[in-house]
Amino acid sequence: MTVALPHDAEAGAVAPTPRLLYIGEFPPSNHHGGAILLKRLLDQHPANSLTIIASQLGMKASPTTDLLKCRYIVFPVLRGSANFWVAKLKLIANCLILVSIALRAVLVIKRRRVEALVSIIQGRYYLAAALAGWVTRTPHIAVVHDNFISGNFQTSTFIAKVLRRWTKKTLESAAHIYAVSPEMQRLVLDECGMHSEVQMPSTTVPTSQPDGHMQLNSGAGPVILFAGTVGYTVKDCLDLLVDLIVSGQLKEYQMPKASLHLCTPLTDEEMLTFGWNCPGIVNRGWVPQSELPRILSSADILFLPYSFSQIAQKAVETAFPSKIADYLAAGRPILVFGPKYSSLVRYAREQSFAEIVDEFSPTALAHTIQRITFSPVDRDRLAARAREVLFTNHDMVRQRRQFYGTLEQVISK
């Protein structure tokens, strides 16, 4: 059966709508990495042809307004414990939960005549997807969004080795693999000998031409905005920017009223714990996808960081920020702050859509903020280039059409 998807219909394309089963800790939504990518790819999928198996934690973290309208099946997932024996018991319980998910998935596949499975190589639920796909001989589409060698496995060395081996088996048995960046694509090839297709974050290309004009009011400083979750891959960068603003160092650069706006799910208690409850730091809360373009376009500078910390090195070398497509679509100057070895800095330098600071230096960061703020030529150049990169590499309509074409191919085999 085929239907014309709303966005694709404008381009005259007819996209197949196979019966799909998605399995992952986080459901497709505007939250958490690969889940954002899948939300946008599946956004037009008919509700009666899609079933989602997700975790209670993932459902709780995902804004209900951004969830897909379809059938959901929710399972628990137990967090680790500092106590050795409690941690072992929880590990056993989580293994039993994975078996239960796989069994439930097999039932769903049989009863709803599912034609393909989709999962994100993240957390643990993808192992259940691979098992269910193997038992039922249903093609499995795997999306590799985070470093599956070191980023996910915060556990004992033995368990990490076992999970690494199982992950390799999962990818080797997948009907098709998507990688979020060229660096991730190389990692999949090096570790598993498997070829994958790069599927970068995407969004709708705006119909109007954005510009880089500053929105400063008289006497105000630039509004620097960060949108996303605050984890170990960005926190050190945000700490440095907060200190730069709160300490008043930007006064030396003619920006005494510069401010940082955070569109994050941080609570007041977390802001207090981080030391970010200070003048000049504004937490605007989590923003639904429907409002995000307006919020991003109201900022003067969009801050796109990737951690310099050694702990995060493996993650930032291969993973890729999901918010990049929304940043590019906003038409505002983008400031990339990260190490030279990160996939983000390499991409930004290759595509020339952002100002880049690749050293963990408050002075270098302040100089770059100053240059963006007081250089109309640079701002206009960045805005124009961002639109070109968005259309070429991050167009959701094109990616969705290609995604459904791939689904049709793997199912027909």
Image: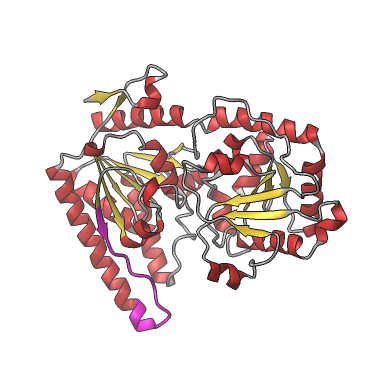
Q: Residue at x 67, y 52 (%)?
A: 338
Residue 104 on image: x %, y %: 18, 54
**At 29% across and 67% down in the image, what residue appears?**
94
Viewer-nearest residue: 286 or 22 = 286
| Residue at 65% over, 34% down | 351
Q: Residue at x 56, y 62 (%)?
A: 232
* Total labels drawn: 0
> Can I make out residue 341 in this image?
no
At which x and y percent is residue 379?
74, 35
Residue 21 horizontal side relative to residue 346, left or right: left
Residue 205 in view here: yes
Magenta residue check for 304 = no
Going by the picture, which residue comes out furthest to the front? 218
Depth order, front residue of 211/241: 211
User: Where in the figure is residue 360, as x and y percent of width and height?
Assistant: 73, 58
Q: Position of residue 46 (x, y in %)?
A: 27, 34
- Region of the chain picked out in magenta, as a range: 73-87
